[in-house]
């Protein structure tokens, strides 16, 4: 598939926003059970929610660039019974509203933030599932059609969100920096395991479709001689990444290094040195790694329609 | 229930692209608006088409067959592109099984194109909506047209009659008979999409000659019966030849 940066930024940015919100809720719930230090006033949560909302809003904004008719985007809430994309379109604003209400309740000192936050957590998990299922439900895109896709969206989003939360807590104070940092390390390592598992799985994929089933001729040797036109078309642009295999390998190793080991090392160093810049650097590096990861996620998917576009003439 | 479809006979398709141009001509002139082209007479031409003809070489030289392969929306009976559409712009008509896009509802998210394993949906780069074969829905029901022209433009244009059109749910229709008699098959059956369009395979063309075609039934000699011939033992005129 051709990786679209609008979707890459949408999925990575809302992942950070979701992870950040979960981190905030963990901090509040932990304080309730006296496992974590309680925050004085609602400023910490309000500021954190505002940042989470910022990530979600920028992600949502990026998604509009993917649409041919952004002014009709409201229509896409219609088919929630059948379409995961439609479900995401409903859950994302719902989650944003919950995060806004959660931050506002903290800012104004209202009670019931735990309830509100709990609702937010449910919407957050729902959003992760919707985002992942958009890709995992396309059964003939065999690289995506696996539960690992959903698991990876959850773990990668949480890992980047907790890394950002650690950086945020290092700046804002509140005594939860180390907890967020430790969770970020654990989540990054877990995400690395599941992402590598997906890579291993995808390397072994045996394509179900072949040129034989595509045109229905049962001969072992079929070669395309013409695809019907000499120039390009939507089919040759949308479904091919158009890069050399070496570029794909480079991006794969880039994300394997930048999204997991480097941020983990930076987080450990930041926690040992109690250094704000290291926390920020850890997030910046991990986010770049996740952009590469998402680019690779799209580029690696091999659409069966490509069988019909093997040779120009 | 009706399921309108095309049956494409790969045995007689000569790859002339008449269906492609006829489709483009009809559908770019319709009420739904033009199908945009960019740089049609320049470098890197590109454009929106509902129908393409591709060419494949099967086998190894010298034992090769050139297969011309027209490809358009297959109007699947279980279309994977329809449930994924977030707006409901993509839909399958219950009355005749045609899969259509409502251009006024489409937001151009391209998700349906991702969900189609056949790659038969193309976005219009200027109108920014997804387009696909409509089975000439604005033609097949047009009562202003003579009855024999109420069929898709591609079918009308095909010079070798490689494209048949009809209801595949009606066992007596020309398409059902063609599928039944000639081993019609579906593309990529492994995905369970049940394409309505079928393809007829390459077949060995054998000449079938019946005995009455070898001997003229209206031969005047036959009408009056055979001429009398002398017996073998009987003397002939020159005593050399005998019947």
Image (spheres, coloured by chain):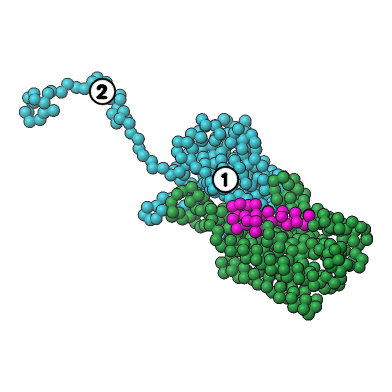
B84 over A200 or under it: above or below: above
Position of A158 compared to B118: left or right?
Answer: right
Which secondary structure lies at badge 1? loop
Question: Where residue A299 sits: x, y (%)?
Answer: 61, 62
Depth check, mark 1 against mark 2: the one in front is 1
Which is more toward the observer, A92 or A149?
A149
Q: CA distance from mark 1 to mark 2?
A: 60 Å
Residue B108 in view (yes/no): yes
Which is more toward the observer, A115 or B19?
A115
Q: Which segment did they paint magenta? A: A122-149
B64 over A46 or under it: above or below: above
How many other residues sit within 10 Å of disc 2, few (<14), some (14-19) or many (≥20)? few
Which secondary structure lies at badge 2? helix
Give the colour in which the image draws chain A.
green
In what quadrant of the picture does the N terminus of chain A appear?
bottom right
Q: Main secondary structure of the magenta part?
A: helix
The furthest residue to the bottom: A273
Question: Where residue A96 sits: x, y (%)?
Answer: 81, 57
Question: Where residue A73 sits: x, y (%)?
Answer: 75, 51
The quadrant holding residue A301 is bottom right
Residue B222 is marked as 2
Question: Where residue B29 sits: x, y (%)?
Answer: 63, 43
Residue B192 is marked as 1
Q: Count all numbered tags in the image, as a single digit.
A: 2
Residue at the spot 67% in from the left edge and 63% down from the top edge: A294
Residue at the spot 45% in from the left edge and 43% down from the top edge: B201
Give the colour in which the image draws chain B.
cyan
B175 over A129 or under it: above or below: above
- Disc nearer the start of the sequence (1/2): 1
The furthest residue to the right: A109
Position of B151 compared to B88: left or right?
Answer: left
Residue at the spot 51% in from the left edge and 50% down from the top edge: A214
């Amino acid at each position: 598939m051709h990786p679209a940066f609008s979707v890459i930024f949408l999925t990575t940015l809302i992942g950070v926003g979701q992870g950040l919100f979960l981190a905030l809720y963990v901090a509040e719930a932990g304080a309730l059970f006296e496992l974590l230090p309680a925050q004085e006033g609602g400023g910490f949560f309000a500021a954190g929610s505002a940042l989470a909302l910022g990530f979600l809003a920028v992600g949502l904004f990026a998604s509009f660039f993917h649409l041919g008719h952004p002014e009709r985007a409201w229509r896409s809430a219609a088919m929630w019974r059948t379409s995961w994309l439609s479900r995401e379109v409903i859950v994302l604003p719902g989650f944003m509203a919950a995060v806004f209400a959660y931050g506002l309740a903290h800012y104004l000192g209202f009670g019931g933030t735990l309830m509100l936050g709990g609702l937010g957590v449910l919407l957050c998990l729902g959003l992760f599932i919707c985002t992942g299922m958009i890709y995992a439900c396309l059964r003939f895109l065999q690289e995506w059609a696996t539960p690992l896709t959903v698991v990876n969206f959850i773990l990668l989003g949480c890992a980047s969100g907790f890394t950002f939360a650690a950086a945020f807590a290092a700046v804002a104070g509140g005594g939860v920096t180390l907890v967020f940092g430790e969770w970020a390390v654990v989540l990054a390592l877990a995400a690395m395991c599941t992402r590598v598992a997906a890579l291993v799985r995808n390397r072994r994929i045996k394509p179900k479709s072949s040129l034989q089933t595509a045109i229905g001729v049962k001969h072992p040797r079929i070669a395309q001689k013409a695809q019907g036109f000499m120039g390009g078309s939507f089919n040759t642009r949308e479904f091919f990444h158009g890069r050399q295999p070496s570029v794909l390998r480079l991006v794969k190793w880039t994300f394997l290094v930048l999204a997991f080991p480097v941020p983990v090392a930076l987080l450990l160093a930041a926690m040992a040195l109690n250094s704000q810049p290291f926390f920020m650097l850890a997030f910046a590096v991990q986010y770049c790694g996740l952009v590469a990861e998402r680019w690779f996620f799209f580029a690696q998917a091999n659409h069966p329609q490509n069988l019909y576009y093997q040779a120009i003439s | 229930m009706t399921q309108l479809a095309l049956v494409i006979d790969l045995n007689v398709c000569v790859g002339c692209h008449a269906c492609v141009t006829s489709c483009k001509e009809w559908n770019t002139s319709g009420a739904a608006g033009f199908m945009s082209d960019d740089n049609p007479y320049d470098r890197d031409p590109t454009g929106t088409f509902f129908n393409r003809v591709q060419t494949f070489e099967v086998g190894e030289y010298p034992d090769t067959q050139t297969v011309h392969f027209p490809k358009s929306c297959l109007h699947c009976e279980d279309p994977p592109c329809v449930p994924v559409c977030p707006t409901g712009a993509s839909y399958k008509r219950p009355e005749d099984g045609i899969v259509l896009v409502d251009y006024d509802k489409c937001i151009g998210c391209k998700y349906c194109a991702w969900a189609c394993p056949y790659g038969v949906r193309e976005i219009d780069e200027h109108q920014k909506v997804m387009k696909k074969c409509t089975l000439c829905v604005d033609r097949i029901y047009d009562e202003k047209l003579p009855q024999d022209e109420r069929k898709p433009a591609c079918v009308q244009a095909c010079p070798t009659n490689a494209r048949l059109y009809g209801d595949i749910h009606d066992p007596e229709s020309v398409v059902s008979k063609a599928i039944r008699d000639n081993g019609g098959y579906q593309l990529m059956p492994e995905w369970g999409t049940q394409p309505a369009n079928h393809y007829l395979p390459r077949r060995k063309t054998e000449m079938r000659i019946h005995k009455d075609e070898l001997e003229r039934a209206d031969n005047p000699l036959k009408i009056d019966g055979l001429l009398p011939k002398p017996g073998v033992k009987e003397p002939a005129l020159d005593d050399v030849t005998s019947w």
